[in-house]
Amino acid sequence: MPKVVFIEANGTVHEVVASAGTSLMQAAVSHMVPGIEGDCGGLCACATCHVYVPDEWQAKCSAAKELEQSILDFAFDVNENSRLACQIELGDDLDGITVTLPERQY
């Protein structure tokens, strides 16, 4: 079961373990990680699960599709490492992934 580390904008660290096949957003919501709301339930229809994925993990994540990139237009403080957590599926290759949360969500 992959481990995920979520780091809030204030530096608070949340380590969770989730089943393979679970999205980063589902892992955060299931473990009540503050700052990940997942209002659309993972349908890629809002930007309330915006996270920053470090460069060293980008290549291990599936590429962002056009819809995700469009939805990120509604997020605050988007940068080149921005992703929607609902679009990243956990697997053994992402065991130990660390993502940082923005100060605010859309």
Image (cartoon, rainbow, N blue to C red):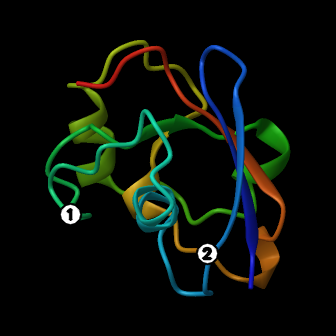
Is 37 situated left or right of 55 in this image? left
Of the two numbered discs 2 and 1 in the rendering, the one whose residue sits closer to the viewer: 1
* Residue lying at the far front of the rendered structure: 32
Q: Residue at x 50, y 46 (%)?
A: 33
The picture quadrant where one finds residue 4 is: bottom right
Instruction: Say which quadrant the C terminus sits in.
Output: top left
Along the line of sight, which residue is nearer the eye, 71 or 40?
Answer: 40
Eyeballing the image, is 43 above or below 99? below
Q: Position of residue 99 (x, y in %)?
A: 67, 41
The picture quadrant where one finds residue 20 is: bottom right
Question: Going from the N terminus, do you reach mark 2 or mark 1 first?
Answer: 1
Q: Position of residue 98 (x, y in %)?
A: 76, 46
Instruction: Say which quadrant the N terminus sits in.
Output: bottom right
Q: Amino acid at mark 2?
A: Leu
Q: Position of residue 94 (x, y in %)?
A: 76, 69
Few, some or many residues within 10 Å of mark 2 (<14, 14–19, 20+) = many
Q: Amino acid at mark 1?
A: Gly
Along the line of sight, which residue is nearer the eye, 84 or 19?
Answer: 19
Q: Residue at x 68, y 82 (%)?
A: 91
In the rendered image, which residue does mark 2 sit on? 90
Q: Position of residue 45 (x, y in %)?
A: 14, 51
In the rendered image, which residue does mark 1 sit on? 41
Eyeballing the image, is 12 above or below 39? above
